[in-house]
Image (cartoon, grey):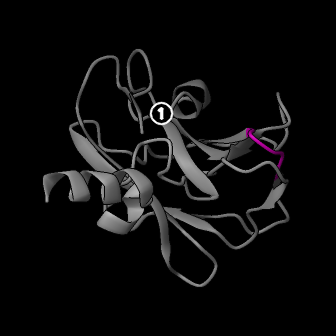
Amino acid sequence: MKRLLALVMATVPAAVFGVVSPAQAALPVFYFSRIQYDSPGSDTRSAGSLNAEWFKLTNSTTKPQQLRNFSVKDAAGKTYKFAVSTVVAPKSSIVVHTGRGSSGAPNSWDRYWGSGNYIWNNPGDTAKLYTPSGAVLDSCKWTRVSPGATNC
């Protein structure tokens, strides 16, 4: 009987048994790849300090993907919405800084929340990415670790 079970498990994909290897686990189209939740240095609310707090979304696919009408929220409900056409190249990322600036500057992947206050709570927070229909596509939760950033 053990040999029969071993033969069946060796010939049937593991996913049938509810076992998925890390290589088989699919990433969502967009995912949080890094969040800098505590800008380096003193929190002065200067443009430089606010823009040193940011999140990075990565396109996991091999095709350009549109972010229009996607949104990101923190645990308190503060919301950033990709209101204009924002296409992310295959296997590339976009960075959204907390403060103000011009989209596409200094790099094509830079965007700005436009906030005069910090968004992410340093002791811990949760970032959620919502599709245009309101479904949660990805999330990243953290508790404070040094140096104030997390890979999701």
Name of the residue lying farthest toward the bottom? 133
Q: Does the magenta segment cover residue 83?
A: no
Neighbours of disc 1 within 10 Å: few (<14), some (14-19), many (20+): some
Q: Nearer the viewer, residue 110 or 130?
A: 130
> In x, y percent, where is residue 47?
61, 31
Amino acid type at circle 1 is Arg
Residue 38 figure quarter? top left
Q: Position of residue 11 (x, y in %)?
A: 43, 55
- Magenta stretch: dominant secondary structure: loop
Q: Quadrant of the N terminus?
A: bottom left
Relative side of 40 to 57, left or right: left
The quarter of the rendered structure image containing the C terminus is top left
Q: Note whether residue 79 is visible.
A: no
39 or 91, nearer to the observer: 91
Q: Which residue is mark 1?
A: 45
The part of the image, by quadrant, that contains residue 85 is bottom right
Please tell me whether residue 146 is drawn above or below residue 134 in the rendered image.
above
Q: Between residues 20 and 80, which one lies in front from this camera angle?
A: 20
Q: Is residue 95 above or below residue 125?
A: above
- Residue 130 position, x and y percent, is 53, 70
In the rendered view, does 86 fall on the left or right side of 130? right
Q: Secondary structure at mark 1?
A: loop
Residue at image coords 55%, 51%: 31
> Within the magenta stretch, is there residue 89?
yes
Image spot of residue 133 (x, y percent): 59, 85
Q: Residue at x 38, y 45 (%)?
A: 120
Q: Residue at x 75, y 69 (%)?
A: 83
Q: Measuring 14% from the left and 53% from the top, which residue is drawn there?
A: 2
Magenta stretch in the rendered image: 88-92
Decide if residue 30 is on the left or right side of residue 118. right
Relative horizontal placement of residue 46, taking residue 9 as reference (left or right): right
Is any part of residue 33 visible from this angle?
yes
